[in-house]
Image (cartoon, rainbow, N blue to C red):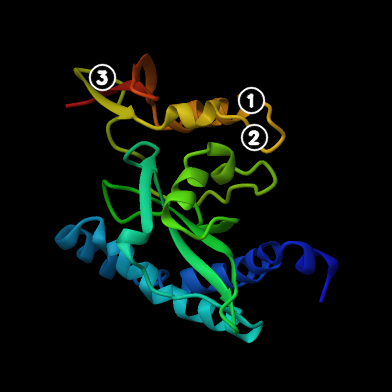
Amino acid sequence: MSKDTNQRPMNAIVRVAQQALPAAWRQAYEGQEAEWEDMFNQWGDRAYGVWIQRFMPPIVAQLAQQGWVIKGGFNRNDSIENWGPPEERERCAWYVVTSESGELLGTLILQIYHSHRAFRLPRAPRFVSVDATERDGILTALSNAATRDRWDMPEERLAGPALAGQAKEVVRWEYATDVAISDCLQPGGDGQVSSWTLDAALAHWGRYGWELVSVLPSGTQTVAFFKRPVAV
């Protein structure tokens, strides 16, 4: 067993899961786009949950070969979706990892980037991890943008159709809010507040034509308001 595995087994677990992920999700998606689009038109966002259920089994099996146990599939109650514009929402689903003897090792986080306009995957899914294994601790970790937006894990953007609502002639506006923008202002593991997480969040909205127009405090959170032009 490597020194890295001894010190923090979740590092090795993420590597194994991430290596198995691309082939798994593509096999469950590519060549079946029409089926997923029909399911989305009928059931909406739940279609993504079915897709996750289809591609997780080989990842579960790969981890089991290494002696790591997770409960596969997709449970909406073990996930949260707070971030991003409707064309690229981020949902984080979590899977508590144990050893074969039942020892808690940490939690594997599956990040799914998806559209609410159609069944579309703007970015490839990926895995990260947190040390917490209880729901409250997992949610606290995920509320820190630095947990999810990893500078050391380049995003894989996927080709897709042009976005609607960005024609030259503007006749009306649409608006959206981000209730988790203050996550980007929390200090990282070194105790320092880094501007790059906030820059990345704003650029994420801007990529789809959303302009930040205002921010307002709401309890302990900060709500960001965005707008963009919509063609008739």
- The residue type indicated by label 3 comes to Glu
Labels 1 and 2: the sequence-earlier one:
2
Task: Tell me where residue 200 appears, x and y as whole percent.
Answer: 55, 31
- Using the image, determine if residue 84 lies above or below residue 216: below
Which residue in the structure is indicated by mark 2?
188
Which residue in the structure is indicated by mark 3?
169
Q: Is residue 59 left or right of residue 93?
A: right
Q: Which mark is residue 27?
A: none
Quick one: SS at disc 3?
Answer: loop
**If the image is split into quadrants, where does the C terminus sit?**
top left
Task: Give the CA separation, mark 3 to mark 2.
Answer: 42 Å
Task: Tell me where residue 11 appears, x and y as whole percent.
Answer: 69, 62
Work out whether residue 5 can be spotted.
yes
In the image, what residue occupies the spot 48% across and 26% down? 202
Quick one: SS at disc 2?
Answer: loop
Image marks 1 and 2: residues in contact by CB distance under 8 Å: yes
Query: For residue 127, what is the image quadrant?
Result: bottom right
Looking at the picture, tell me which residue is in the foreground, 226 or 140.
Answer: 140
Task: Give the CA separation, mark 3 to mark 1.
Answer: 40 Å
- The residue type indicated by label 2 comes to Gly
Q: Is residue 68 left or right of residue 86?
A: right
Q: Which mark is residue 193?
A: 1
In the image, what residue occupies the spot 63% across and 86% down? 65
